Amino acid sequence: MMSEQEALKCSNARNRGGTQRVEGKLRASVEKGDYYEAHQMYRTLFFRYISQAKHTDARELMYNGAQLFFSYNQLNSAADLSMLVLESLEKSEAKVEDEDLEHLAKLFSLMDPNSPERVAFVSRALKWSTGGSGKLGAPKLHQLLAVTLWKEQNYSESRYHFLHSSDGEGCAQMLVEYSAQRGFRSEVDMFVAQAVLQFLCLKNKNSASVVFSTYTQKHPSIEKDPPFVQPLLNFIWFLLLAVDGGKLTVFTVLCEQYQPSLKRDPMYNEYLDRIGQLFFGVPPKQSSSYGGLLGNLLNSLMGSGEGEDEEGEEAQEHGSPIELD
C-alpha cells in the first residue's frame, strides 16, 4: 500500500502536470493571436484556484501568463494578470519572500513606464510588502524598483526608492550617473549631500556613510579622499564623524561654521534640525510639526508625525521623490 507521504507526492505531481497542460493550451491560444479568449481563461482559472485555496498555483499561472502577454505586447492583459499576482499574495497572507519581491519587480520592469497601471501596481505591491520590515515598503523591493528606474534613466524616482532601501552603494553609483547626465559641474557636491542628509533623517547611518564614501570615490570630478575642494563635501564628511561621536557642541559648531555652504539649499537646515533631534538630543522646535509644502516633503521622507502611514503610502502612490534643485 502507498504511504500517506507517497500519496501526497503523487497528488502534487498530478496537479503540476495538470497545470502544465493548462498552461500549454493557454500559450497556444496566445501564440495564435486569441488574446481576449486566453485572457478570460486565465482569469477564470485564477478565481477557480483561489476558491480552492491553491494560491501558489494561481500566482505562478498569473506570473507566467503576464510575462507571456508582455512578450506579445498585450500590455493591458499583462497588467491585469500582474494585479492578480498581487491579489493572490494578499489573499493567501503569504510571508514576504525575496522570490516574490523579485517577481513583482520583474513585472514592474515590463510595464509601460507611463501607464497608470504601473503606478497602481507599485503602490499596491509596496503596501503588501509591509508585511515584512519597513513601514513604507520592504527595503528589498525598494532596491529592486530603484534599479529598474535607474536603467530607465528615471533618476529622481530611482533616488526616492534607493532612499528607502539599504543599498547605499547602488544609490551612490546611480547619483554619479545622475550628476554626469543631468547636473551642472558646480552641483556635484549637492547630489550626494542631499542623499546623505536624507538617509540620516531616516536614521539610516550606515547607508549615509556608504553613499558618501562610494560617491566621492567614484565621481570623476571629486578627489578620492578628504579634505575636498568643495566645502559642502567637507561638511558632510565632518557631519558623519560627528554623528558617530554624538557630541552636540561639535554638531553646533560645525553647522555654524559651514552656514555659507548650507545656504545653497534651504532644505539643508531643515534636515539638520531633524538630525540634531535624532543623533544629538536637540529638543524639537516649539511648533510640533513642519508646515506647508516643506512639512509634506519632510513627513513623506521621514514617516514622522501623525498620519505617518497615510503620508508614506501617498508618497509612494504618486511616486513623488524629493527633487534635487
Image (cartoon, rainbow, N blue to C red):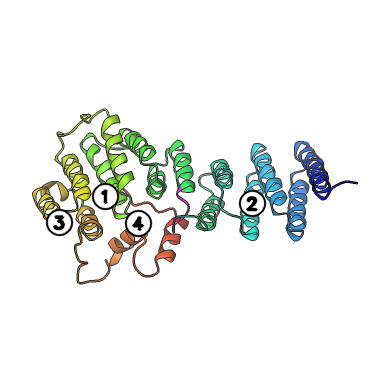
Residue 85's tag is: 2
Q: Is mark 4 on a helix, strand or loop?
A: helix
The kind of residue tagged 1 is: Leu
Contact between marks 3 and 4 (CB within 8 A): the answer is: no
User: Which corner quadrant of the image does residue 91 belong to?
Assistant: bottom right
Left or right of 170? Residue 70 is: right
Q: Does the magenta stretch include residue 18?
A: no
Gap in angstroms between the C-alphas marked 1 and 2? 37 Å
| Residues rendered magenta in the picture | 134-139
| Residue tagged 1 | 197
User: Which corner quadrant of the image does residue 269 belong to?
Assistant: bottom left
Gap in angstroms between the C-alphas marked 3 and 2? 50 Å
Question: In the rendered view, would you say 228 is above or below 309?
Answer: above
Question: What percent of the width, then of the height, locates residue 154?
Answer: 42, 42
Q: What element carries label 3?
A: helix
The kind of residue tagged 2 is: Val
In the image, what residue occupies the spot 78% across and 48% down? 37
The kind of residue tagged 3 is: Leu
Dot 3 or dot 1, earlier in sequence? 1
Gap in angstroms between the C-alphas marked 1 and 4? 11 Å
Gap in angstroms between the C-alphas marked 3 and 1? 17 Å
Question: What percent of the width, then of the height, locates residue 10?
Answer: 83, 44
| Residue tagged 4 | 301
